[in-house]
Image (tube, rainbow, N blue to C red):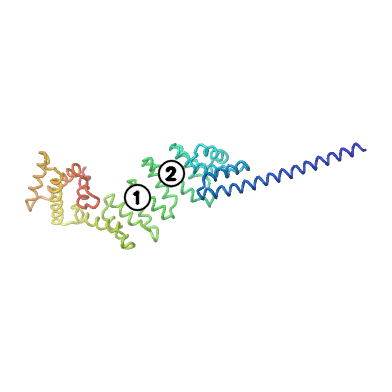
């Protein structure tokens, strides 16, 4: 009986000690979790304040105290990236991605690391995983940022075809965001995709009650693709909204001047077409002489032919049109390029470009 009682007492003591140890362990764990959360908050604040080295130390403490929290590892990876310690940052980010490979922000941080390291192909893949990854509602602006950074990556590489595709994807992904739509149109135009830019900017002009600078940019795009009537109209709409806009005013005036010189405009009377031909032939004759194109037998023959045609008041218009195209081609290929504000030079360049 005494032995049994002793065994019961021993068991009770063991249970009490185990319970006490469990309480202590839970208390210690709770304290570590709290300390980790405080370190995480302090580290995040330090990053925001630009104290990168301090942030790294605090976030290392957070990871050490609570290693099961992937957001702490990601925060440490981001802080290491900020201070330029890319090789240290990479394993923390990969560890998060090992657990949640579709996490959008983790893929974005990895893409930034890879791009900074010069690994452009892997960075591109990581950006796409970020764009199509999983994001919380509050973090959606970062998904948009991933697209913008991918566009910047393509621009820095000179990858024009991929840049075009990414810009078109951007415009399709955010149809209600006027500023992003404008950026896509502006970037398409800057990259030389005037047709795409014009379509994009025309949609903005038609879709939004306040299209911002879309009409001005549309006028630029239409002028770039030699649609001078459309450029004139778009710049005119822009001036209705932005009366003092110098770019819109310049495009409006230049488009009007080009249209007033072009001998191929529809609905011109024969007399007006002939007058425009004569004015342009006089101008290109002067340009060829000014840039030294009187030298050489071929140039001399062309200038002589121009002189004879201009000397006859009843010269054949069709002959004059062929002569103008030949002279414009000679000027465009041998003389300095015309300035952007040179309306007659623009007409001559277009005539040279229109050769079959």
Which circle, 2 or 1, is nearer the viewer? Answer: 2
Judge the density around disc 1: few (<14), some (14-19), many (≥20) Cα neighbours within 10 Å.
Answer: many
- Using the image, determine if residue 207 lies above or below residue 192: below
User: Quarter holding the C terminus?
Assistant: top left
| Residue 214 percent across, percent down from the top left | 35, 56
Judge the density around disc 2: few (<14), some (14-19), many (≥20) Cα neighbours within 10 Å.
Answer: many
- Residue 294 horizontal side relative to residue 237, left or right: left
Question: Which residue corresponds to mark 2?
Answer: 150
Residue drawn at point x = 53 percent, y = 52 percent: 138
For the residue pair 189 and 57, the one nearer the viewer reads as 57
- Residue 228 horizontal side relative to residue 320, left or right: right
For the residue pair 5 and 201, the one nearer the viewer reads as 5
| Residue 87 percent across, percent down from the top left | 50, 36
- The first of marks 2 and 1 along the sequence is 2
For the residue pair 201 and 345, the one nearer the viewer reads as 345
Cα–Cα gap, marks 2 and 1: 19 Å
- Name which quarter of the figure residue 100 lies in: top right
Question: Which residue corresponds to mark 1?
Answer: 197
User: Quarter holding the N terminus?
Assistant: top right
Q: Residue furthest right?
A: 1
- Dot 2: what SS? helix
- Residue 170 horizontal side relative to residue 256, left or right: right
- Dot 1: what SS? helix
| Residue 23 percent across, percent down from the top left | 74, 45
| Residue 17, label in figure | none
Q: Are marks 2 and 1 in contact (CB under 8 Å)?
A: no
- Residue 177 horizontal side relative to residue 16, left or right: left
- Name which quarter of the figure residue 233 lies in: bottom left
Q: How many numbered badges does the structure rendering display? A: 2
Residue drawn at point x = 13 percent, y = 42 percent: 293
């Amino acid at each position: 009986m005494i032995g049994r009682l002793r065994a019961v007492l021993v068991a009770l003591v063991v249970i009490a000690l185990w319970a006490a140890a469990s309480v202590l362990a839970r208390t210690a764990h709770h304290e570590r979790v709290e300390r980790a959360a405080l370190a995480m908050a302090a580290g995040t604040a330090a990053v925001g304040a630009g104290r990168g080295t301090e942030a790294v130390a605090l976030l290392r403490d957070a990871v050490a105290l609570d290693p099961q929290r992937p957001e702490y590892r990601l925060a440490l990876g981001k802080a290491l990236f900020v201070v330029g310690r890319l090789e240290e940052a990479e394993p923390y980010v990969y560890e998060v991605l090992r657990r949640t490979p579709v996490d959008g922000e983790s893929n974005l941080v990895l893409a930034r690391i890879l791009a900074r390291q010069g690994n452009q192909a892997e960075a591109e893949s990581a950006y796409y995983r970020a764009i199509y990854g999983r994001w919380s509602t509050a973090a959606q602006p970062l998904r948009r940022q991933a697209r913008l950074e991918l566009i910047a990556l393509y621009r820095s590489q000179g990858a024009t075809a991929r840049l075009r595709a990414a810009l078109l994807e951007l415009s399709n992904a955010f149809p209600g965001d006027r500023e992003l739509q404008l950026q896509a149109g502006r970037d398409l135009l800057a990259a030389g995709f005037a047709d795409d830019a014009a379509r994009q900017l025309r949609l903005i002009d038609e879709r939004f009650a306040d299209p911002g600078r879309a009409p001005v940019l549309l006028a630029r795009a239409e002028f770039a693709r030699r649609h001078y009537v459309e450029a004139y109209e778009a710049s005119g709409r822009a001036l209705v909204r932005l009366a003092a806009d110098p770019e819109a005013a310049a495009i409006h005036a230049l488009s009007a001047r080009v249209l007033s010189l072009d001998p191929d405009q529809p609905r011109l009377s024969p007399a007006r077409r002939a007058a425009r031909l004569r004015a342009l032939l006089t101008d290109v004759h002067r340009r060829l002489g000014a840039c030294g194109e009187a030298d050489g037998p071929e140039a001399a023959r062309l200038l002589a032919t121009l002189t004879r045609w201009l000397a006859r008041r009843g010269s054949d218009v069709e002959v004059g049109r062929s002569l103008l195209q030949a002279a414009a081609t000679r000027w465009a290929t041998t003389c300095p390029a015309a300035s952007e504000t040179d309306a007659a030079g623009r007409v001559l360049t277009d005539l040279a470009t229109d050769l079959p």
